[in-house]
Image (cartoon, grey):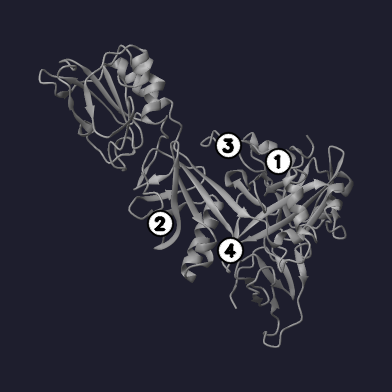
Amino acid sequence: MNEHTKTDGLPGLDLPAVPQVLERARPRNERMASGKIECNACPVLCQISPGKTGACDRYANTEGVLVRVDPVLFLRRGAVEARAAGEPLPLLPLDGSAPAEQAASGDDFFVTGVGSSTTYPDYKPAPFIVASQARGVDMVTVVTEGIFSYCSFKVKIDTDRWLGPEQANIRCKGEVVGHVTTAEYGSQMLSLGGVHHLTGGSKKEGRVTVEVMQALGNKQPVDLSIDGGSQITIQAGRAPIVNGVEEQRMRVGCGSATIGIFAKQFWGQCDEVVVVDDHITGVLTEHQAGKCLDMKPSGLKIRGRKSTPGRYFQVANPGTGWGGTDIAEPLSIIEGWDAAVAWPGLRLLMTSTTGEHAAWFVLDEQLVPQPAPMPAEVQRVVERIGENCEPSMTSVMFLGGAGGSLRAGVTENPVLLTRAIKNALVNVTCGGAPAYVWAGGGITVMVDVMRMPDNSFGTVPTPAIVAPIEFSMTMDDYQRLGGHMEPVRSLGQALRQGAWHHDGAPTRRADVPALQANGWPLGTPPLLG
């Protein structure tokens, strides 16, 4: 049975000896070596020797007692607010010390599922069912770590760069771990992980998939290759690296939108503008914006399939060149000029949707575009396009199906929890971060990993992802849905259990200006208004 020699977190190494105890050793199996204990925190059932950890490095055997290696994470409100403001704050010591029970309030402390342990083999109540008062209301938070086989990461990459064909396989270390999905406005979208990659392929595929998922969830970089496309390095909160080059900009809009947005600024400075785009290339004088400005037709003939006036599809193939196309020479998409309409001296601007590519041409006597120095006024408009492009960024969303067995850790009648969530009686968080609950059946949650505490995700070698989840509600509602009342403990008791620390998440970062501080988990609608 797999086991490791890692012992950090065991008693005697600056951590309390008792608070991390999960349970006493089960009666020894006749086939189990003397001194070993069986961990039943996941289906692997590691047989752990004294002083060693199980295969997941999360549980250990110390003198015949099964303990957690990692401390339970508590959020402390002052820490969250300070870190959200960018102020450094040291962690509380892992010595079991805690405020007096009467001073512990749900307005100040919140128990997360990070490090809390699981409910496996599923009939057990959640490891922490914590009663507290928040704004004078009696609350209960049910805290656990879910073992998620049905989960994935949805990755949004803000870039105009083409990464690979839709539906293409995404690989890590040669193994398929996901696929390219439908692009959104200015963003390439990836779907990584999922039960079929975790369980439906070879052992290596499952192992590599769970490694990729854990790294992404814990905000670490991952190297991937896309069949028929690019080599990429992605990391939550960072710009992607595509074929060894760090991306800079998300496009301001498609070619048509760029024409519309800046048409008035082009007017009087250009006789024609072409905004090259993989999806919708815009031509100013044909576009409704140009017509409204009473611009003279240019006689330009452009390659591609005309959609509506001034909007062209399929002017080029997808690629890493101008506007997410495969072209390096912008004039290659021009088929010619109508000699009855065009004129010598016509001023042509060609630009991409990010302004990273731009060129200025003037028609000669034969109506051939000749490169020319770009006027300063036109250059300022191109720079304005770039100014309006948001920074290229990678966003990683954890998507997990929590509609399975972990519900039994909340209530003996799991469907009542599902109904209470749908009726907005229960607030669902992941590591204290707000989770979006999808419509429809079950409990399918999605959360931005940048809003979760660092190192929130673990794995078990089944393989599956281990992720924190918390269900908060009023005490009355918990009783009504048939919750496990006997193991309810006060917040003060939970704090005195020890082996805990706080780490207010997320930290506001200068390189992620859009990152928002989380609302307090027990102070967000619909619970306390």
Task: In the rendered view, tell whether residue 179 sits above or below residue 12.
Answer: above
Depth check: give the residue in front, 364 or 374: 364
User: Which disc, if any, is residue 158?
Assistant: none
The N terminus: image quadrant: bottom right
Percent across and percent down for residue 349 are 27, 22
Closer to us: mark 1 or mark 3?
3
Q: Which mark is residue 79?
A: 1
Q: CA distance from mark 4 to mark 2?
A: 21 Å
Q: Secondary structure at mark 3?
A: loop
Q: Nearer the viewer, residue 81 or 162?
A: 162
Determine whether 490 is above or below 36 in the image: above
Tell how many labels.
Answer: 4
What is the CA distance from the residue labelled 4 to the residue labelled 3? 28 Å
Estimate the x, y position of residue 36 in percent, counting from the top left.
69, 80
* Disc number for residue 515: 3
Q: Residue at x 71, y 69 (%)?
A: 121
State whether residue 93 appears in this view: no
Residue at 55% x, 55% y is 152
**Secondary structure category for the residue under label 2:** strand
Looking at the image, the residue that sits furthest to the bottom is 30
Pointer 4 residue: 464
C-alpha distance separating marks 4 and 1: 31 Å
Rounded to the nearest whole Å, what is the CA distance between mark 3 and mark 2? 30 Å
Q: Which residue is mark 2?
A: 169
Mark toward the viewer: 2 or 1: 2
Q: Look at the image and tell me in which quarter the C terminus lies.
A: top right
- Pointer 4 or 2: first along the chain: 2
Answer above or below: position of 247 versus 260. Answer: below
Residue 520 in view in this figure: yes
Density class for disc 2 (Cα within 10 Å; few <14, some 14-19, many ≥20) is many
Q: Helix, strand or loop at disc 4?
A: strand
